[in-house]
Image: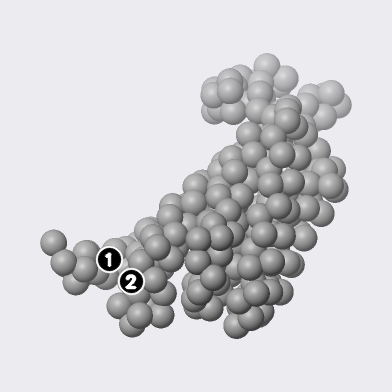
Amino acid sequence: MSIEHYQQQLLECVGAVDITIQSVATAAHAYTEILKAGEISKPEYQELMLDIQRKANIDSSITDLATKEKLNVAINGLISIIGMV
Amino acid sequence: MKKLILLLVSSMLSSCALIEAYQMKPFDPNEYQLITEIRVDARQYKTECVDAIQSKTNAYILMRKSELFMSYSEHIPYNNNVTKASIELNSMAKGIAEQYQKNDKVSPVFCKIKFETIEHSAETIQKVIGDKPR
């Protein structure tokens, strides 16, 4: 398989409805183009590709936390309402 | 009425999520300050990427700061999400420091993208830490 083959697959993902998939594919495609242009080395490219995964993990943890914060507000709100009833 | 609300809430949520959400630690100004510093530093450092010697120092400073953030968050109870995010952020910062350790000729483009990614991720974390209940 060639770089072009995988890039084609990335380009198909750039049009995805899911914003996370779209941003991952866009970043991976951009980094591949920068590598091909000789602006970064192969180890640097590998490091940037690892960052895509790390960023996705951060986004996932943070989304989960944001949901818990909403739950916290809702639970405490309900507890105070029950206290008043 | 009370029973109805409790039944409604408990049926909607898994017990784990319910406990974690209820036990969530309130806003921690130290945690917020650390992540803000990482964000602001990364924003500044990305503008200094043409200077390789300065950038090497910057990469080490940011790595140490992200280690501090990770270690600070690590033992705060019911703080798993921030801890997980801080571990990933530290890996990002380690990644750039390691490139400078291996090779003095790190590409300015790589340097800029790395600090930019760290800046954006720090901002994502900062927003949620800032939203923690007071």
The residue carrying mark 1 is A10
Q: Judge the density around disc 2: few (<14), some (14-19), many (≥20) Cα neighbours within 10 Å.
A: many
Q: Amino acid at mark 2?
A: Thr
Instruction: Tell me, yes or no, if residue A38 can be seen here.
Output: yes
Q: Nearer the viewer, residue B112 or B106?
A: B106
| Quarter of the image that includes the C terminus of chain B | top right
Q: Is residue A53 above or below residue A61?
A: below
Residue beneath the point at 84% across and 23% down: A83
Q: Position of residue A77 (x, y in %)?
A: 77, 35
What's the distance in space between the residues labelled 1 and 2, CA to CA? Answer: 10 Å
Q: Judge the density around disc 1: few (<14), some (14-19), many (≥20) Cα neighbours within 10 Å.
A: many
The residue carrying mark 2 is A32
Q: Are marks 1 and 2 on the same chain?
A: yes
Q: Give the structural element (helix, strand or loop) at label 1.
A: helix
Residue beneath the point at 58% across and 20% down: B15
Q: Is residue B114 above or below residue B24?
A: below
Q: Are marks 1 and 2 in contact (CB under 8 Å)?
A: yes
Q: Where, by quadrant of the figure, is residue B61 drawn?
A: bottom right
